[in-house]
Every structure is written in structure tokens, then in C-alpha cells.
Image (cartoon, rainbow, N blue to C red):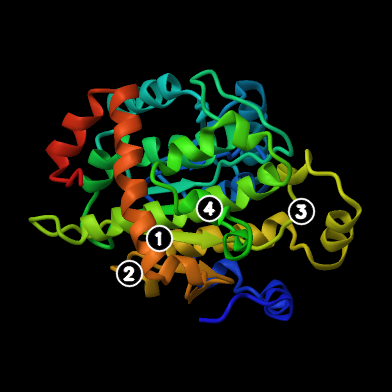
Amino acid sequence: MAPLYPWQYLYYQYLPLPSISAFSTDLGGKTIIVTGANTGLGLEAARHLARMGPRKLILACRDARLGNQAVWDIRDDTGYEPECWVLDLASFESVRGFAERFEREGGGRLDILIENAAVSFPTYETSEDGWETMLKVNHLGTAHLALRLLPFLLAAPAEPGPRLVVVTSEMHYWVYDRGAMLSERLLETLNDEERCQQWGTMPMRYGATKLMNILFTLSLSSRLARLQPPTRLTANTVNPGFCHSSLTRHMAHPLLSALKYVAARSTEAGSRTLVHAALAPELWGVSGVYLNACQEREPGDFVVSDEGKHAGEKLWVETLEVLFKAEPGLREVLKACGLEED
């Protein structure tokens, strides 16, 4: 497809979204995790899901205080009380601990995992594990959590089928550091401090990580499709559009403020795209797609190009290398799931 032009972007921003009632369902017996659920899109998505009565709804939040406030907010609004579990995607150890807790307390199955948590910073920062923070949280931490919880997703009932939903952004169309994506060692290049300190690099970083979300999810989806016996688990990405949220709190700019005033969706409206991806019946058995405005769309040119497909496979291999080093036991987790490493 052609690049996403500004008029197309505004068209999608103003496109009416379906109401939650269009795909609302009884979630009795279901277990759901929403990351980044203490505020913004994650909180509003969790609120919608709470009204459908899941067996267990876990708000995965970095800050326990804010997470518990979200629990009380949802309880007071809906009468349903979710659980707050601490999860810091900037820490490999936190992801491992979260997964181990789920193994003990999750009930043995996970029906829906919505990976919504993300960060955006204008300058170079590093996580406790030595990775540039946006790269660590938005890609490595997100991938780590999905793979670590894979056994529980695969254990969920085949009908209507478990779902992995990864939140991405239309930014992947335009701003993604093409040079890094085509480099010999993609992750090392993106994590290089000297490169990160160069003018113009960090403003492209958020878009790059959202592109990586799509590439990695496509790689995972293609491997799920080859599992034997077959699985009904699907893995898709969803773009909620530009919304009023705290994600851009570190990115003060007059043009961004003007765009938010003119075109941004409410967090409630944006959250419907997440719930649609998690529940819509037309997506049963549909995997490896990019969703925008509650419709399946073709992602950016780079994703569907030969270069993009090569970058996606390289990203898969490099990501597993990093994750296996951080948590050697993950290799056995994936092996038990029948998932290919290469």
C-alpha cells in the first residue's frame, strides 16, 4: 500500500468507532491480563472488560499505588473488583517474577493478554538491565512477557480461542530509524549510546519500537500457525489512534498539543479498539493482522516489504538471544510449547 498520508491519518482519527455493545460478551470463567492498566487506554479497556464479569482480571502495573487506585476506581464504577499485580517491563527480573506468580495463582490458563504498556521519552535513558528504556519496555519487555505467558495462553480452551493483543501505533508508518532496522545487529545498533545521543535519534525511537511490535508479533503468529497439534491462539497488533493519554507527557511540543486538541480521541474511545481486538467475533481464528479503527488494515510499507520481512526474522532471533541470556529458563518454556527458536 502507499504510505499513510496526513489526510488518511485524519480520516482514521475521525472514523466513528463501534460501541462496546457491538462485541460485548459474557466473560465468566475467563482470565485476562491488561498491562499498563492504571491509567489511560489500559484503565478504560479494563473498565469495559470488568463490566463483562471475567473470572479474573489482572491489572499489570509498574506502580502498586496507582494500580490499586485503578482497582478501586473500577470497583466503584462497575461493582467488579480486579486485581493489581506489579509488573515493571523495564526489568527482566520483574517479568520473570510476574510469570512465576501467574503460574502459582493464575488458575493454569490465560484467555486474553492485552499488552498495552509503553513509554515515550524525548532523551536517552537506560533501564536497570542496561537497555535504552523505550527499547526495553516497548519491545524487549513486551516480547518477554508474551513468551513467558505463552504456556498459559496455549492452555486456554480452543473455543473461541485465546488472544494475544499487542498495542502498536500509526507512528510505525513514518518514524522508525530505517538505518538501524537494516543493520547487521538490529538490537545492538538501537541500543548503542553514541547513536542514541545523535540528534534526531530519540524522537524516532517510539515509532521504531512500535514497528518492532508489529514485526515480532508477525513472527510469533507465523510460528503459532505451524504448531502441532494446531492452536487457536491468535496474535495481532492494534493501533488505538492518537488519544488523550499520559503517554506524551514527556513530549511537550506546540504542534503535538495542537494535534491533540484537534484530532485526539478520548481514552474511552481509544480503549474500544483494544477491547475489539480482544473480543470481536469476526477475529476468531484470525492471526497476524494489524487493526486500525476496529478494522483490519495493511501495515506500513516497510512491514510488508522483503526488507521488512528479513528485519522481522532477524529481530525474532536477536530478541530470543537477549531473552535467553536474561532468563535461561525461557528456552525450556518455549521448547515445551513446541515453538521454534529460529
Judging by the rendered image, the residue that carries numbered circle 1 is 236
Q: Which amino acid, by three-letter code, is at mark 1?
A: Asn
Position in image of residue 27 (x %, y %): 40, 53
Circle on res. 244: 3
Q: What's the residue at 22%, 24% (across, down)?
A: 329
Q: Earlier in the sequence, mark 1 or mark 2?
A: 1
Q: Earlier in the sequence, mark 2 or mark 4?
A: 4
Q: Which amino acid, by three-letter code, is at mark 4?
A: Gly
SS at mark 3 in the image: loop
Q: CA distance from mark 1 to mark 3?
A: 23 Å
Q: Nearer the viewer, residue 176 or 276?
A: 176
Is residue 59 visible to the viewer in this orientation of the structure? yes
State yes or no: discs 4 and 3 in contact (Cβ < 8 Å).
no
State yes or no: discs 1 and 2 in contact (Cβ < 8 Å).
yes
Q: What's the residue at 58%, 40% (across, down)?
A: 37
Position in image of residue 134 (x %, y %): 58, 37
Q: Which amino acid, by three-letter code, is at mark 3?
A: His
Q: Earlier in the sequence, mark 4 or mark 1?
A: 4
State yes or no: discs 1 and 3 in contact (Cβ < 8 Å).
no
Q: CA distance from mark 4 to mark 3?
A: 31 Å
Judging by the rendered image, the residue that carries numbered circle 4 is 179
Disc 4 or disc 3, which is closer to the eye? 4
The residue carrying pointer 4 sits among few (fewer than 14), some (14 to 19) or many (20 or more) residues within 10 Å by Cα, namely: few
In this picture, residue 119 sits left or right of residue 150: right
